[in-house]
Image (cartoon, rainbow, N blue to C red):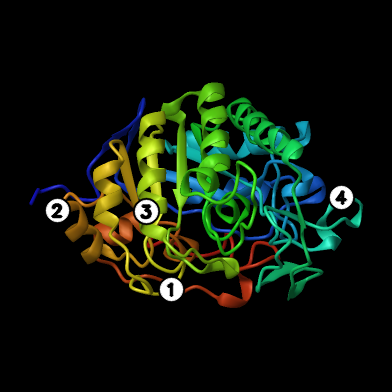
Amino acid sequence: MTDKTIFDPFTLGALTLNNRIVMAPLTRNRAGDGLVPTDLTATYYAQRASAGLIITEATQVSPQAQGYQNTPGLYTPEQIDAWRKVTDAVHAKGGRIFVQLWHVGRVSHVDLQPGGKAPVAPSAIRAETKTFVNNGFHDVSEPRALELEELPGIIEDFRQAAANAIAAGFDGVEVHGANGYLLEQFIKDGANQRTDRYGGSIENRARLLLEVTAAVVKEIGAQRTGVRISPVSPASGISCSQPQPQYDYIAEQLSALGVAYLHVVEGATGGPRDNAPFDYDSLRSRFKQVYLANNGYDLDLATTRLAQSKADLIAFGRPFISNPDLVERLSTNAPLAQLDPTTLYGGGAKGYTDYPTLG
């Protein structure tokens, strides 16, 4: 046991974080024309800059990577300039901020894809899920399988987006390898039935995530790079027959790349922590850098896990939506404000920047 608390400063790579509390990525569907963050976005993140680290909402690495209405990108000059306003606002408040980079793969709709084309995936298997498009939730579209020669372009999109992130003033990036999106679709055999070097074995199915991460590390450095995984989450209709050996291997390989942290969704994303058997301590032992734990954490559980050295940083998601001063509320045992679920996705300031602080 240790006497560590979530309110202690923490060293992450070359950064000093004010505490061990991380704001998890939270999709809010409020990007403006051209999928650029708005001035409201800058206000939203600056309000929450007391977190030791903010990880932004998932952000597209290309037009093809989009799967939800009004989610931001990081591939045009206008998007880079808009994100710079966000990072400047957070840094002015003394905060640290990473951007989460994603490609949704099959979790998309033809109305969001360039030219109305089919979404892409490792295999032509439709996800049993819905996406937010045309101002409502609708079934995702049937995907097509990516050709082998297309995969270097996917890797390049992530590398370029990472370079754009640094140009926009971010302290680093998080590669989104979780929640049933493209990189996890390659990892998990419920979505990947390929017979080439990106399918079949544990090593082959992990290849795209590792190649993307290696390209990002080469571009911006390992200390500025994190990776998110969700070993047993069924999010977006995903499944894996043997998650333990698959993710033990991934943890070892990411550790060898030297990435700054491994962000682990423990259990079902936004759901029960014990939805499926999995040994998270095994990941912890194999990954030698910072372990960022996520899913269903409150102050008591966070304190216990830190004291047991089972995690280094703790991510909080929805509590940050309705509590911009979550760090202060936790530190003073103040009651938490409840969020308005009707304002989670899309809209304006209501339910976004108008939640009051204790002051």
Residue at 46% across, 69% down: 270
Q: Of marks 3 and 4, which one's residue comes earlier in the chain?
A: 4
Task: Give the CA distance from mark 1 to mark 3.
Answer: 23 Å
Give x and y (percent) for residue 31: 72, 52
Q: Nearer the viewer, residue 211 or 90?
A: 211
Q: Of marks 4 and 2, which one's residue comes earlier in the chain?
A: 4
- Amino acid type, residue under disc 2 in the picture: Ala
Q: Secondary structure at mark 3?
A: helix
Residue bearing the label numbered 2: 307
Give x and y (percent) for residue 17: 33, 37
Q: Residues within 10 Å of mark 2 (few under 14, many from 20)?
A: some
* Horizontal side, residue 195 vs residue 313: left or right: right
Residue bearing the label numbered 1: 271
**In this rendering, the label closer to the viewer, 2 or 1:** 1
Q: Which mark is residue 232?
A: none
Q: Nearer the viewer, residue 296 or 213?
A: 213
Q: Of marks 3 and 2, which one's residue comes earlier in the chain?
A: 3
Residue bearing the label numbered 3: 245
Give x and y (percent) for residue 135: 78, 71
Task: Give the CA distance from mark 2 to mark 1.
Answer: 24 Å
Q: Residues within 10 Å of mark 1 (few under 14, many from 20)?
A: some
* Horizontal side, residue 97 vs residue 353: left or right: left
**Does any portion of residue 46 appear in the rendered image?**
no
Residue bearing the label numbered 4: 114
- Amino acid type, residue under disc 1 in the picture: Gly
- Amino acid type, residue under disc 3 in the picture: Pro
Task: Give the CA distance from mark 1 to mark 4.
Answer: 33 Å
* Horizontal side, residue 18 vs residue 324: left or right: left
Residue at 30% across, 46% down: 20
Q: Residues within 10 Å of mark 3 (few under 14, many from 20)?
A: few
